[in-house]
Amino acid sequence: MRVLISSFFHNVRFYRSLRFRIFLIVLFVGFIPALTMRFIMIRGYETRAMNQKISEVTNQSSIVAAHLARTDYFSDTSDSIINDELIQMSNLYDGRILVINDDFLIIKDTYGKSQGKYIVSSEVISCMNGSRNMSSTDEENRYLEITVPIVDEATGNVCGALVASASTDGIHDNKDVLSRRSRVVQVILTILVVFIALALSSTLLRPFDKVIKAVDSVKEGFDPGVDSIEVPDYTETRDIMDAFHHLMSRMAEVDASREEFVANVSHELKTPLASMKVLSDSLIQGGDAVDAETYREFMQDIAAEVDRENKIINNLLSLVKMGGGNEDGIELKLQELSPILQQLIKTLTPLAEQSEVELLYEEKMPVEAEVDETKLSLAIMNLMENAIKYNKKGGWVKVTLDSDVQFAVITVSDSGMGIPEESINKIYDRFYRVDKSHSREIGGTGLGLAITRNAILLHRGAIKASSIVGEGTTFTVRIPLRKDI
């Protein structure tokens, strides 16, 4: 049952609403003080009235006790003056008066019921032994009892006690009247607090309604007017709208990037097709006049364009597989990194020799890490291949393997042409080329570094480039040694 109730409140929309919760907070903040004030007011009246009653009865009892001490009432209870005084006091407080001698014998009872009987109570005993006033209250029967000693003025000894009981019905009746009136006031205050809570909850959340309206405006597409929407009522709403505008700007950038990507893909795929179309049309138009050598040269060019087209498509497929950072597509395995890098050196040595570039490898320490060998090899190979292709004759490419406490560190540095500072942050964009003319000559697609970056991010690593134009470039790759680091 408790689970069902909890589930109900968790799923009820109004209960989870901030407006409802603000309403409850304001309601409690207003209701609890009103309830507390009612309790304090009633309790305070009861305490003050009771204390006043006790003080009044005690004073009157002390006066009567003094009169008793100055007469011979304990020997002769027929004194009409004293008896009238006791009866008047009994009638005044709607109570009962007992006069007790030092043998605990009741010599006078205004009710006439206990006269001649003995009384033994803690209040009477304490009063006679301690010569001090005693008081007690009975809430259930609505009366209070005052016990005062009767002290012989000549000897100073306690010769008896006077017990006076007084009704507290009047106090309780006034308390009930006050309680009813305060309850009416409390109901009025509660209604007022409810209206205030409703007004405040609506007013305080009105700026958030503007935020919701602004967010809803983009459900059917981007709204050009969203950028101008401001909700400066609160710091929180201003921060939310700033974040929202930033998100809209980012979405616009993503949309523009997507359009640019589609345009670039179309252009990159169209260029080889256009070249093959021109070459094939030339062969068709030449007919039998085309000699075998020209035919072979054109066919080689067509094959090269097919290879280029195939390379672009394969690179795009690699981007699709690694794009989005989905770690489900990566198979990590703990292994030595040095054999992987040495194999890449061996694979790219022919390309380096063809470009007259020296390949160097330095292992500062053995490093084991959890990596996907295929994807890591693809990433480092792209860096090494670019370093070779964009180098100069007689230049060098150096691969270094190192490690710190948490990361494996692989650096690929070269003595090539370098990257301008304004292009450093753009080199990982798809189809971006620093030197477009040179890229065409060496067959670059502009996708290699994008693939590299995605592969490194899949390993939860990082890549950083530093370069000086005319002197060379260094790429630093950092990969966690363990997945849980």
Image (cartoon, rainbow, N blue to C red):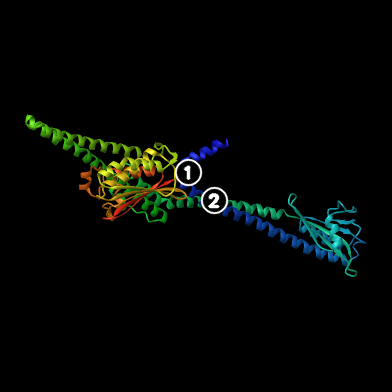
| Residue 75 sits in quarter | bottom right
Vertical position of residue 46 compared to residue 261: above or below: below
Give the residue type that dot 2 points to: Phe
Vertical position of residue 297 compared to residue 425: above or below: above
How far from the left and from the top, in percent, is residue 418? Answer: 27, 53
- Relative to 308, is 285 on the left or the right? left
Distance Cα–Cα, label 2 vs label 1: 47 Å
- Residue extending farthest to the bottom is 154
Give the residue type that dot 1 points to: Asp
- Relative to 313, is 113 on the left or the right? right
Q: Is residue 5 visible?
A: yes
- Relative to 320, is 55 on the left or the right? right
The residue under label 2 is 28
Crowd band around label 2 with a 10 angstrom C-alpha radius: few (<14), some (14–19), many (20+):
some
Q: Is residue 323 visible?
A: no
How far from the left and from the top, in percent, is residue 261? Answer: 26, 42
User: Upstream in the sequence, badge 2 or badge 1?
Assistant: 2
The residue under label 1 is 484
Crowd band around label 1 with a 10 angstrom C-alpha radius: few (<14), some (14–19), many (20+):
few
Q: Which mark is residue 284?
A: none
Which marked residue is nearer to the observer: mark 2 or mark 1? 1
Of helix, strand and loop, which one carries label 2? helix
How far from the left and from the top, in percent, is residue 448? Answer: 30, 43
Viewer-proximal residue among 6 and 359? 359
- Relative to 245, is 64 on the left or the right? right
